[in-house]
Amino acid sequence: MVFGGRLLGRLRRTRLFGEVIRFMMVGGIATAAAFVLFNGLVHGFFFGAGPMNGQPIPAYVIANTVGMLISYDLSRRWTFRHRVSDHPDGGFTAYVVINAVTMLLPIACLYVTRNMFGWDSAIADNVSANVVGVLLGQVARFFLFRKFVFGRPIRYTQVYGSVEEEAAALGFTDDKTVMMAPERRETRQVVSGSTDRATHDRAG
């Protein structure tokens, strides 16, 4: 029981670390898409004023709505693949609400630099909204998505059958207990099944 509890703790930490890394990668992809679109709308891809140069906040909302759709699909299929949503729509509505709320952080940063400091250059806009604001928003989104969108972890036994089997699949070992590789487990099961049948035949 002690080994099982310690192993379960290690598996949970490993899973959390993997989720953080995947979330950062997905966030980078979605942010890159939003970055390109935002700068096209506002700064004409750095070649002059874009069609929404005087409307940076609506342009930011449009660009990040596209990024949100990309992020949702990748998060559901990859980042939180070991977690499921209890929402009937797969958590999409909660995802949109959380994105809308956390989008206020970079919008607030953009508002301050534009309207309070009068900075309207491409560098100022991108540092305030796409660096400082995005970092704050990403931290908030990770924990909110994990809690309210993909809130229920898939049980280990739904995938591996036991905690020990997942540990073996991930390569974890204990000082006193060496976990068998999946191939060896399968071989043991086949041999065990054959032995059981032979014993049953002899008994018959």
Image (cartoon, grey):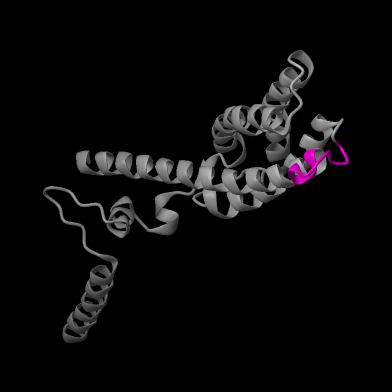
Quadrant position of the N terminus in the picture: top left
In the image, 105: left or right of 10?
right
Residue furthest to the left? 176
In the image, 162: left or right of 81?
left
Q: Is residue 99 above or below residue 19?
A: above
Q: Is residue 63 above or below residue 111?
A: below
| Residue 16, horizontal then vertical, whole percent | 42, 41
Q: Residue at x 84, y 34 (%)?
A: 53
Quadrant position of the C terminus in the picture: bottom left
Count of numbered badges drawn on the protein:
0
Q: Residue at x 45, y 56 (%)?
A: 158
| Residue 115, horizontal then vertical, whole percent | 79, 17
In the image, 200: left or right of 144?
left
Q: Is residue 112 above or below residue 123?
A: above
Q: Is residue 151 visible?
A: yes
**Can residue 48 be found in the magenta stretch?**
yes
What predominant SS class does the magenta segment belong to?
Answer: loop
83 and 140: which is toward the camera: 140
- Residue 5, image quadrant: top left
| Residue 8, horizontal then vertical, whole percent | 31, 42
| Residue 36, horizontal then vertical, whole percent | 71, 46
Q: Is residue 88 visible?
A: no
191 and 44: which is toward the camera: 44
**Can residue 3 be found in the magenta stretch?**
no
Q: Residue at x 64, y 46 (%)?
A: 32
Q: Which residues are magenta?
A: 43-52
